[in-house]
Amino acid sequence: MSDSFNLEIVNPEKLFLSLDNVSEVVVPAFEGDMGILKDHISIISFLKPGIVKVFTGNEVKELYVEDGIIEFSENSLSILTSRIIDIKEIKKDDLSSMINEANEALKDENLDDQKRFIANQKIDVLNRLN
Amino acid sequence: MASLDDLKKRITSVKSTQKITKAMKMVAAAKLRKAQESAEKGRPYSDKMHNIILNLSRNINDRENAPRLLAGSGKDNVHLCVVMTSDRGLCGGFNSNITKKAKSYFKKILDSGKELKIVTVGSKGFDQLKRAYKEYIIENISFKESKNVNYFDADKVGKMIIEKFEKGEFDVCTIFFNKFKNVITQIPQEQQIIPLKSEKSDDKNDVMNYEFEPEEDEILNNLLPKNISTQIFRAMLENSASEQGSRMSAMDNATRNAGEMVEKLTIEYNRSRQAAITKELIEIISGAESL
């Protein structure tokens, strides 16, 4: 396929996903969702909690990420994240415990705006999945 | 010369020691495979992280206003050393190699009149350092409860270090760990993580023009703390693989030594048994002759 590029998703423990026939990836970048196609300009950005959508042919894979950095250069996209879960494998119990975790974090009075925003975002996304 | 009974007892005792070391070796070998695998799997993440940071820091022109985690606090007075060792013993020179390396570094720091602070990760390092450097140790962390090395433990250590840095408790941070090369070789390493040492690469072709969203500074501010945790996590992974490797070869040696000892003792036992028999025969014969 001519209009496909490479995708690598790594978390600290392992190489989570590696594909070489991705046609489009939508990532929840910090300043809004961003769709990446082949020959995108080289970019570095970081992610907020949300859903990464990976399009390969007719298939769509959806992954929940908590945070991360993306780097795109020369038609290969790397996503580095500390926590990533396939939406199909996500369990209800995990969801609610993750929501509780975020709610707990919000209770901290000294939280700066950015962290507060991220926690709120996390709750939003998780509630939508629930 | 020891009596026959004593020799017999010693042989049995050495044999049971051999059984224990053999079992430990086998356990270490099994754990090593796992640890090695996860150390290798963890490498892409830290390598990629390193690359991205390198790219970012090249794009920063204004060195003066660069984030402090990258540029440092501008001083070089207080050194924080994070010494990472294992929680268990019986792994050959693993822990003492790290502490030896760390101690020589401590000496250098103290000799040049700078202030020294030590954080130990893993109880063995604490045990070895507390005698000589007790007054410098500010924290002792141990992950005895967690079975496997995991990122959240590393993150905890990383956050603690960053918190201390932001409070201005130290200027330079160095971590000590064993890098896993292969089962018989582990190399003790010192790695400076704050301020970040970026090796200067000469080829300018490497520099790519990236677009940044949001600004470089903001990304760096977000990324640098993560990098600290990642480096620590990587050190922990390398360390755990090294520990198992070192234990395996130590136990292998112990098993072999025990085997040699059993052989030597058995020969001695047989000799003295033969001597006793000969003595008895002589006694009988000379008794018969005298009749």
Image (cartoon, coloured by chain):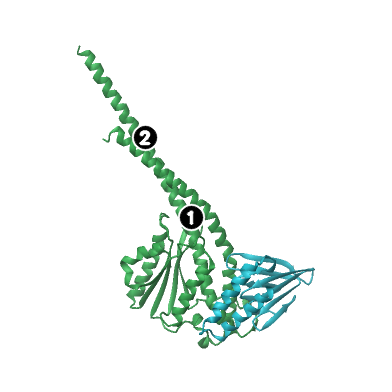
Label 2 is placed on what type of residue? Answer: Thr
Seen in the image, is A33 located left or right of residue B273?
A: right
Chain cyan in the figure, letter: A
**Could you tell me which residue is drawn at 68 percent across and 70 percent down?**
A63
Find disc 2 in the rendering and name its residue.
Answer: B266
Seen in the image, is B267 located left or right of residue A2?
A: left
Residue B66 in sight here:
yes
The chain ID associated with circle 2 is: B
**Could you tell me which residue is drawn at 51 percent across and 51 percent down?**
B29
Chain green in the figure, letter: B
Q: Earlier in the sequence, mark 1 or mark 2?
A: 1
Residue B245, labelled with which disc?
A: 1
Residue A71 in sight here:
no
Residue contact at pointers 1 and 2, CB within 8 angstroms = no
Q: Nearer the viewer, residue A119 or B243?
A: A119
Residue B189 is situated, as x and y percent measured from the top left of the image, at 45, 66
Please tell me in which quadrant of the rendered image residue B121 appears: bottom left
| Vertical position of residue B209 compared to residue A88: above or below | below
The chain ID associated with circle 1 is: B
Q: Nearer the viewer, residue B158 or B95?
A: B158
